[in-house]
Amino acid sequence: MYNRILLPLDGSKLSECAIEHVRAIASGCNASEVVLLSVVGSYEPGSGWSWGGVISESQMAETTRKAEEAAKKYLARVQKRLEKDGLTVDTEIMVGTPADTILDYAKATGCDLIIMATHGRSGVSRWALGSVAERVLQLASTPVLIVSPKGCRV
């Protein structure tokens, strides 16, 4: 039923709430692959501010490089945990806006299912920060399973 399952992770304990669901569904469906995707934010040079003024292009590049390095280490740890259960796991790190990058990746690579956790924001914080999970759910052309953090063992 599901051969290629996409699990977007942002490094938070809340995003990891979806791991148990991925493990169960991938095992139950004999999925051929689970893809762990981390999206590193992208910035246009001159768009970011620091205490010293506008952040330069080289500072942006260094910040992105460090974020990619941290994401690589994080995804490798999660990959090992899932591979211990006999799952075939691949990792992918991309630069962009999270929701759009997740949607583009899922479509371009033929993912059958996206499983992701919501951070459970509501009210002003949801309005201010937006909801990646909500955007993915609304715009995805593949099935999406949203895992609520309520009751998650974090």
Image: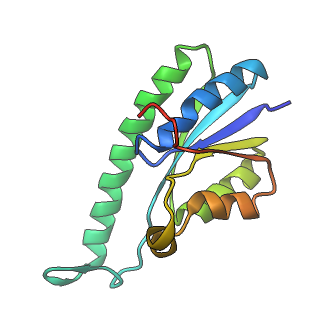
Residue 81 x, y percent position in the rendering: 48, 21
Q: Does 102 sit above or below residue 15?
A: below
Which residue sits at x=80%, y=32%?
Answer: 2
Instruction: Choose between 91 and 148: the one closer to the eye.
Output: 148
Q: Which residue in the rendered view is the most extreme toward the right?
A: 1
Residue 59 x, y percent position in the rendering: 25, 70
Which residue sits at x=78%, y=46%?
Answer: 110
Instruction: Choose between 154 and 34: the one closer to the eye.
Output: 154
Quarter of the figure that contains the C terminus: top left
Residue 111 x, y percent position in the rendering: 75, 43
Q: Does 99 sit above or below residue 21?
A: below
Quarter of the figure that contains the N terminus: top right
Q: Does 49 sit above or below residue 73?
A: below
Q: Which residue in the rendered view is the most extreme toward the left?
A: 52
Tell me where residue 104 sits by quadrant: bottom right
The coloring applied to the image is rainbow
Which residue sits at x=57%, y=61%?
Answer: 132
Q: Is residue 24 left or right of residue 130?
A: right
- Counting labels gives 0
Tell me where residue 153 sits by quadrant: top left
Q: Is residue 152 left or right of residue 21?
A: left
Q: Is residue 82 left or right of residue 139?
A: left
